[in-house]
Image (spheres, rainbow, N blue to C red):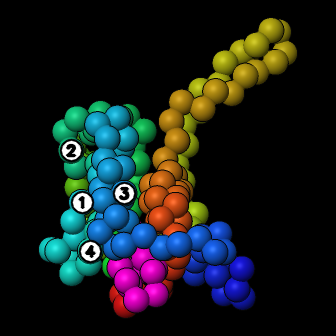
C-alpha cells in the first residue's frame, strides 16, 4: 500500500496478476446488475465517464425499501477507465434525498458531496425485550456506501486493475 492510497480509497490487485482488457472490466461491472441488488450499474456517456453505479432510490420497485428507512443520501460512483495503466478512476457524488409523501426527490444543496465518500451509512434497528431485564437489538435495514462500492472494487481487482479514488474528475 502506498502512502496516500488509504486517503484516496485506492486498492490494488495482487502483485503479478495480469490485467484483463478494458472491455472485460466493463462487462464485469455491468454484470453486477441483478434484480435483487439495490444498485444499478450502467453506461456513463451522459456523465462523460465510462460506467456509473448508483442506488435505485428513484425506481418505483425500490422506493418502498428506501422509503421505509427514510434514507437521506443517494450515492453515485462515476468510473473512468485508464487502459494504459490498467486503472479505474472513481469519483463519488452524493445528494441529499428529501421524501415527499413517500416519493424521493434528489436535491442539490450545501450537503452535496463530490470526491470520495468513505463513511456514509444509515441503519435501522428493532429493539425487543429479552427476558425480564434484557434487550435484543436486531438490525432491520442497512445502507452503506461500502455496500455499493465494495462489489465494484472487487470486480475491478479480480480483473487485475487498480481501483483509484480521485478527489475530482480526472
Mark 4 and mark 1 residues within 8 Å of each other at the beta carbon = no
Magenta-drawn stretch contains 63: no
Which element carries disc 3, helix, strand or loop? helix
The prevailing secondary structure element of the residues shown in magenta is strand
Residue 28 numbered mark, or none: 3
Q: Of the residues under marks 2 and 1, which one precedes in the sequence? A: 1
Q: Name the front one of labels 2 and 1.
A: 1
Residue 50 numbered mark, or none: 4
Instruction: Check the image and report above or below for 6 versus 151.
Output: below
Q: Of the residues under marks 2 and 3, which one precedes in the sequence? A: 3
Q: Residue pushed farthest left?
A: 46
Task: Tell me the distance, in whole angstroms, between the alpha carbons under discs 2 and 1.
Answer: 14 Å
- Which residue is identified by label 2? 59
Q: Position of residue 136 (x, y in %)?
A: 73, 22
- Which residue is identified by label 1? 42
Horizontal side of residue 99 vs 168, given as left or right:
left
| Quadrant of the rendered image containing residue 170 | bottom left
Instruction: Check the image and report above or below for 4 versus 163.
Output: below
Residue 135 numbered mark, or none: none
Q: Of the residues under marks 3 and 1, which one precedes in the sequence? A: 3
Magenta-drawn stretch contains 84: yes
Which element carries disc 4, helix, strand or loop? loop
| Quadrant of the rendered image containing residue 4 | bottom right
Amino acid at each position: 500500500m502506498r502512502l496516500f492510497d488509504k486517503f484516496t480509497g485506492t486498492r490494488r490487485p495482487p502483485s503479478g496478476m495480469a490485467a484483463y482488457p478494458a472491455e472485460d472490466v466493463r462487462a464485469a461491472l455491468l454484470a453486477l446488475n441483478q434484480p435483487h441488488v439495490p444498485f444499478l450499474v450502467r453506461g456513463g456517456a451522459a456523465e462523460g465517464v465510462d460506467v456509473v453505479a448508483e442506488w435505485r432510490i428513484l425506481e418505483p420497485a425500490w422506493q418502498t425499501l428506501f422509503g421505509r428507512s427514510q434514507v437521506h443520501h443517494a450515492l453515485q460512483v462515476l468510473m473512468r477507465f485508464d487502459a494504459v495503466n490498467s486503472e479505474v478512476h472513481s469519483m463519488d457524488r452524493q445528494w441529499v434525498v428529501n421524501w415527499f409523501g413517500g416519493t424521493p426527490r434528489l436535491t442539490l444543496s450545501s450537503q452535496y458531496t463530490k470526491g470520495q465518500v468513505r463513511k456514509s451509512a444509515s441503519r435501522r434497528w428493532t429493539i425487543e425485550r429479552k427476558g425480564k431485564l434484557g434487550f435484543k437489538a436486531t438490525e432491520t435495514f442497512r445502507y452503506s456506501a461500502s455496500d455499493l462500492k465494495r462489489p465494484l472494487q472487487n470486480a475491478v481487482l479480480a480483473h487485475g486493475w487498480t481501483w483509484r479514488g480521485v478527489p475530482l474528475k480526472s
